[in-house]
Image (cartoon, rainbow, N blue to C red):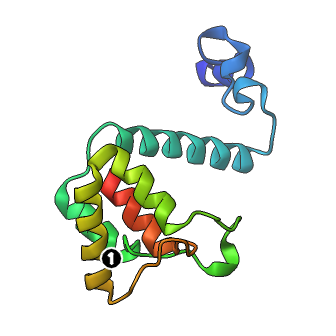
Amino acid sequence: ASDTGIVVHGLFGFEALRPQALFGTVAEPLNHGVLWSLSINTLFFVLGSLSRASVPLERIQASIFVPREASPMPSLRRFRTTVTVNDLKDTIARYLGVERTERSFQSFEKSNVTLLHGNEQASMDVIRFSEQLLA
């Protein structure tokens, strides 16, 4: 008898806690159960994931599926940049100093076997390198 009372009147007599119309959502019992089950499981999954820092093993495993060096496809770029290599060098030099900036860009040129010209448009690799310098 008390089981039907919960279904009709809700848990503790609250209409909002009726099992087949939880918080006022009315649907078929299967749809309703799937919706609330997925919602609650997703909520606890996200809260559990955010509640602690990842361990090195998890970061290594994640890097298998999402490589750090993944570059966006050119067709997916939303905008074209007009930033030049000199613009990047000037900006970075304000934070790191001129000498360290020049050494860093020379190291980049050597490791990538490329020659950067000051007034040319900066490639995504150069922009990404600049971001890492400032990080």
Residue 135 seen in this snapshot: no
Please name the amino acid that badge 1 sits on.
Ile
Q: From the viewer's perspective, is residue 45 above or below residue 75?
A: above
Q: Residue at x 81, y 34 (%)?
A: 26
51 w.r.t. 42: above or below: above
Percent coordinates x, y for residue 63 in the rendering: 32, 71
Q: Is residue 112 above or below residue 103?
A: below
Q: Tell me residue 73's x, y (percent).
A: 60, 79
Q: Nearer the viewer, residue 33 or 95?
A: 95
Which residue occupies the extreme top position in the image?
Answer: 13
The extreme left residue here reads 56
Q: Is residue 87 visible?
A: yes
Spot occupied by residue 112 in the image (x, y as percentages of width and height):
33, 85
Q: Give the camera-side residue of 99 and 63.
A: 99
* Rendered image quadrant of residue 101: bottom left
Residue tagged by mark 1? 64
Q: Residue at x 74, y 21 (%)?
A: 8
In the visual, does 60 lie left or right of 45?
left
